[in-house]
Each structure stands twice: as structure tokens, then as C-alpha cells.
């Protein structure tokens, strides 16, 4: 019997999208195709499911179990699967963690509970208990999702470090602090712990700048469209080839304009439209309260994909 080594979250980990049909039900065939497209990209470390990019806020626990089953069947023998834990209640979070572990996931990505936005930064013991409750449900490694401080869901630096000290299963943070100076402090402080914690950037709007600070990898929904370019950028950074990193970053920049302009909540909506334009999704439906983009914005996305040198003829798994 083969014994799996514990998964170490680092490297390039795209967060995949979830296609829906016209009735807003999970569209399994294009989902499988999308997973295969990602798994065929050379140089990935894992794939993330049931996170923001899959509109997890609109998925039932039963649907999350189904998407995990599909992903395990389609790509589980090629790459580890990171499973999102999106829950306001700690007990519900533990239930999702157990379901993910039983279904074959190799790692958890734990979102902050939305209830923390109502002053949770003043009660660090609540965040600590949330992670302890989820960690007690399974022995899977955990990636902590660090949000920006402004909306109230980001963990203050002292709280972040204490969570990492108290919950040894936390092996990385997905850093979305959206503050370059704080991003660097997170990196330095996490590496100074007795048990260092990896830093995964999700700052896709300024990814090269983020990687130069020394991140251990990338976990981002943008990888659902440009995982090959993220691999190339990370490889160039690791090899110290700044000219190549800049070249790839120049190709990524139009995708930043396509995905991350206001309103931010439409970012994965835009990624679906991009994949539809590139011939990798048959349709680009999103579940309410998200809504179809305007034709003007869809046209802009298509222009940005062209500017990035992407097309339906692009050999997706290649880095160039």
C-alpha cells in the first residue's frame, strides 16, 4: 500500500472555476474539461476547488461534495486537491473539513468567517477557536486565507502569528492583505516562527512585485485562465531571470486589466467570460446574486485576452 506524504502547500496552485448550465445547475462535462486543461499545465503543485473562483458562496454542502468527487475522478491521480472551507460557523467549517478529507482532498483553504467583520479583530480568541475547531476535525494541512484589514476580515499580525503558533496544521497562508508593506512583514514574520509557515501570494494584480519579495508560490483564481503564465513567471523568479520574468509579466498585465478592475466581485465572472472567448468553456453563466456582464465589458475582456497573446489556438499547457 502506498503511503502519501503530507502535502506541503507551495508552488503554483490555480483555483478553478465551476461551469453552470442555463438552469444554473453544475455543468459536469465542461467542468471535467476545465479540470483536465489545468492538470495538463506543466509545473503545477495542486488545484484548488470550492473556493471563491467556484462561487462557493452559492454552493450547498452536497454540491461541494459532488464537485470534489468529480475533481478526484478527473484529476485526483495527477495533482493534490486543496478544498475550500467557507463557513461562518466553526462547527459547519469542521463538517466541511471532514467531508473534504473523506472525499480525498489533501489540504484545506480556510476562509475567515463573515461574522468576524463585525469587530472580530478586537476578539482574537474567536479566530483562534475557529481554526482550532476545524483543525480538530481532520489532520489535513491548512492554508489560512488572509484578507485585507479594511473590511474587518483580515487577521491583525499578532493574531495571525498566534493562530499559526497554536494550530500546527497551518502550513501556509494565502495572502491577500493588499498592502505591499504588510505583505513583506507577513513574509518575514512567518519565516521567523519556530515552525516557519509558507507564503502563497494571491496578489494577481501585482504578482511580479509580490513574488520578488520571496513568496513560496501562488494560489489564485487567475490561474484558471493563465496558470501556464504563472508557472513561467514563478520559474523565472526562482531562477533569477528578471528579464524573462518581466516579459511574462508584460503578457499578464492585460489580464489584470480584464479581471481586477472595479467592481471586484465580478473577477471570476470575468474569468468565465475569458475562458468562453478562448474556447475553453461553452458558456459563462454565474449564479445570482452575480449577474451576466454587459456586452461592453465582455468586449473589453476579449481585447485584453488578445493583448495578452491568448487565443483559442494557444497551447495552454506550455509556459511561453
Image (spheres, grey):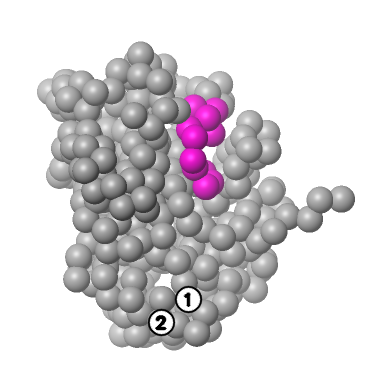
Q: Is residue 173 left or right of residue 4?
A: left
Q: Is residue 291 above or below residue 311?
A: below
Q: Is residue 55 above or below residue 281?
A: below
Q: CA distance from mark 2 to mark 1?
A: 6 Å
Q: Which residues are magenta?
A: 36-47
Q: Which residue is mark 2?
A: 192
Q: Residue furthest top?
A: 313
Q: Which quadrant of the figure has residue 243?
A: top left
Q: Are marks 2 and 1 in contact (CB under 8 Å)?
A: yes
Q: Give the image location of residue 184, x and y in percent.
A: 26, 70
Quadrant of residue 273 within the rendered picture: top left
At 28% from the left edge and 23% from the top edge, which residue is drawn?
Answer: 310
**Is 262 covered by the magenta stretch?**
no
Viewer can see residue 58: no
The residue under the point 29% across, 26% down is 274
Q: Residues within 10 Å of mark 2 (few under 14, many from 20)?
A: few
SS state under label 2: helix
Q: Residue 155: where, in percent of width, then height?
A: 34, 75
Instruction: Tell me: residue 179, above or below residue 50.
Output: below
On screen, residue 148 versus residue 58, left or right, reads left
Residue 220 x, y percent position in the rendering: 37, 47
Question: Counting other residues with Cα less than 10 Å from the Cα at mark 1, is it few (<14), some (14-19), or many (20 or more)?
Answer: some
At 55% across and 51% down in the image, what residue appears? 82
Residue 88 location (% of width, % of height): 45, 64
Helix, strand or loop at disc 1?
Answer: loop
Amino acid at each position: 500500500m502506498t503511503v502519501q506524504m503530507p502535502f506541503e502547500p507551495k508552488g503554483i496552485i490555480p483555483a478553478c472555476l465551476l461551469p453552470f448550465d442555463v438552469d444554473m445547475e453544475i455543468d459536469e462535462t465542461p467542468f471535467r474539461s476545465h479540470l483536465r486543461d489545468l492538470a495538463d499545465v506543466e509545473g503545477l503543485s495542486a488545484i484548488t476547488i470550492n473556493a471563491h473562483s467556484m462561487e462557493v458562496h452559492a454552493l450547498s454542502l452536497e454540491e461541494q461534495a459532488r464537485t470534489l468527487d468529480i475533481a478526484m475522478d478527473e484529476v485526483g491521480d495527477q495533482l493534490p486537491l486543496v478544498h475550500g472551507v467557507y463557513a461562518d460557523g466553526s462547527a459547519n467549517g469542521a463538517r466541511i473539513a471532514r467531508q473534504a478529507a473523506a472525499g480525498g482532498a489533501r489540504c484545506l483553504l480556510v476562509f475567515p468567517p463573515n461574522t468576524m467583520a463585525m469587530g472580530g479583530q478586537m476578539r482574537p480568541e474567536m479566530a483562534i477557536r475557529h481554526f482550532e475547531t476545524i483543525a480538530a476535525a481532520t489532520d489535513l494541512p491548512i492554508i489560512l486565507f488572509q484578507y485585507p484589514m479594511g473590511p474587518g476580515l483580515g487577521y491583525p499580525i499578532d493574531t495571525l502569528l498566534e493562530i499559526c503558533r497554536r494550530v500546527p496544521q497551518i502550513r501556509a497562508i494565502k495572502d491577500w492583505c493588499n498592502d505591499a508593506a504588510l505583505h513583506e512583514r507577513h513574509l518575514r514574520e512567518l519565516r521567523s516562527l519556530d515552525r516557519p509557515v509558507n507564503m502563497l501570494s494571491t496578489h494577481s494584480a501585482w504578482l511580479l512585485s509580490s513574488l520578488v519579495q520571496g513568496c513560496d508560490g501562488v494560489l489564485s483564481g487567475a490561474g484558471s485562465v493563465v496558470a501556464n503564465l504563472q508557472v513561467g513567471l514563478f520559474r523565472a523568479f526562482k531562477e533569477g531571470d528578471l528579464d524573462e520574468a518581466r516579459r511574462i509579466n508584460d503578457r499578464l498585465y492585460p489580464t489584470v486589466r480584464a479581471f481586477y478592475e472595479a467592481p471586484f466581485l465580478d473577477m471570476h465572472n470575468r474569468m468565465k467570460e475569458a475562458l468562453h472567448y478562448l474556447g475553453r468553456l461553452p458558456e459563462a453563466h454565474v449564479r445570482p446574486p452575480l449577474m451576466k456582464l454587459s456586452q461592453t465589458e465582455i468586449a473589453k475582456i476579449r481585447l485584453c485576452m488578445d493583448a495578452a497573446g491568448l487565443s483559442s489556438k494557444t497551447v495552454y499547457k506550455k509556459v511561453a
